[in-house]
């Protein structure tokens, strides 16, 4: 099994370009798939440099309805004629980031016209290798960085509840690998959900943790980050993080987790 980062915020290969986004390419014994597509058509260029034939992709899973994860889907539909794209029905919401001014960060509504998009209302088992779960319950705190992410309604902006978020579980032999985009529900809540479904812990977790901020970290932020790291270290899983975790938060977590935590850069390739 092979997992390669086609798009991520940082780079391990000078020939590749980066953007604020995420696209992971996965090879299993029976599938060629993508988790997310980045923010643009950059994944196409990087895939060519990494000798990855996107026409062979049979499955795409969209982790949630933000355009730094689904911005490349229109381009993907042009270069691939067979793959199904799985997303939650709520992925086509009016999603905004609120900083200096509201900024639309949702998906291109034209995608709704594609017959290859499979709209889900919750979890789905695709086959023996691939399973999607959604409807994550937030019993533990969610990332404080979620606070700037909103849904536009007829009466204004409300807090995004991330019902459009879903996770992919890949089972190969005795190993289970959990893939998430940004873990907006909180990586600990996602892991709790995983344990409730499978009655075990994942062998490997690949996910952003949504800890990156545009402002300087406060003492409370650092306590939050260290607390998450301590909890993650109690799992038997090996963690690879990227994208919305941010390099500063990663460094804090690495001090706590040691070799249980690694950073996945654009161009990195993992083999299991």
Image (cartoon, grey):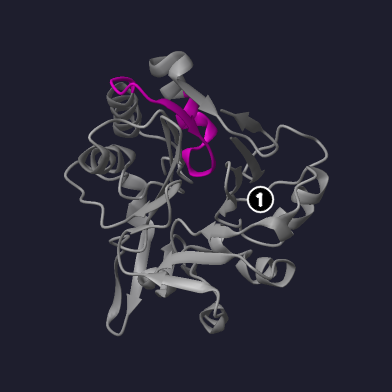
Q: Position of residue 169 (x, y in %)?
A: 41, 44
* Element carrying mark 1: loop
Tell me the quarter of the image containing the C terminus: top right
Residue ID for mark 1:
19
Report the residue at 40% width, 18% height from top: 257
Vertical order, 247 against 126 (above or below) = above
State yes or no: residue 123 in magenta.
no
Q: Position of residue 4 (x, y in %)?
A: 64, 39
Instruction: Name which quarter of the figure residue 98 lies in.
Output: bottom left
Q: So how many labels did they put on this image?
A: 1
In this image, 238 relative to 23: left or right? left
Report the residue at 51% width, 71% height from top: 107
| Mark 1, other Cα within 10 Å: few <14 / some 14–19 / many ≥20 | some
Give the residue furthest to the left.
139
In this image, 201 relative to 64: left or right? left
Q: Which residues are magenta?
A: 233-251
Vertical order, 241 against 166 (above or below) = above
Report the residue at 70% width, 56% height from top: 56
Q: Is residue 256 at all visible to an observer of this figure?
A: yes
- In terms of depth relative to the viewer, which is nearer, 4 or 20? 4
Vertical order, 65 against 141 (above or below) = below
Q: Is residue 21 at all visible to an observer of this figure?
A: no
Q: Position of residue 94 (x, y in %)?
A: 41, 75
Tell me the quarter of the image containing the N terminus: top right
State yes or no: residue 245 in magenta.
yes
Q: Position of residue 83 (x, y in %)?
A: 60, 65
- In terms of depth relative to the viewer, which is nearer, 220 or 49? 49
């Amino acid at each position: 099994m092979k997992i390669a980062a086609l798009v991520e915020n940082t780079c391990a290969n000078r020939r590749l370009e980066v953007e604020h986004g995420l696209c992971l390419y996965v090879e299993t014994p029976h599938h060629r798939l993508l988790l997310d597509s980045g923010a643009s058509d950059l994944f196409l260029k990087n895939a060519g440099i990494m000798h990855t034939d996107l026409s062979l992709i049979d499955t795409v899973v969209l982790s949630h309805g933000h355009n730094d994860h689904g911005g490349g889907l229109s381009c993907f539909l042009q270069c691939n004629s067979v793959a199904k794209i799985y997303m939650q029905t709520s992925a086509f919401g009016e999603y905004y980031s609120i900083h200096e001014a509201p900024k639309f960060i949702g998906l291109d509504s034209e995608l709704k016209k594609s017959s290859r998009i499979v709209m889900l209302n919750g979890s789905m088992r695709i086959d023996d290798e691939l399973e999607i779960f959604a409807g994550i319950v937030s019993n533990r705190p969610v990332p404080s960085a979620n606070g700037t992410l909103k849904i536009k309604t007829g009466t204004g902006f409300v807090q995004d509840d991330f019902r459009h978020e879903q996770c992919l579980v890949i089972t190969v032999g005795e190993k289970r690998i959990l893939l998430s985009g940004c873990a907006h529900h909180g990586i600990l809540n996602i892991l709790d959900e995983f344990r409730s479904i499978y009655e075990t812990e994942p062998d490997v977790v690949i996910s952003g943790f949504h800890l990156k901020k545009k402002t300087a970290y406060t003492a409370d932020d650092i306590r939050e980050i260290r607390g998450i790291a301590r909890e993650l270290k109690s799992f038997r899983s090996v963690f690879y993080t990227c994208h919305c975790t941010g390099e500063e938060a990663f460094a804090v977590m690495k001090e706590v987790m040691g070799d249980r935590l690694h950073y996945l850069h654009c161009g990195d390739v993992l083999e299991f």
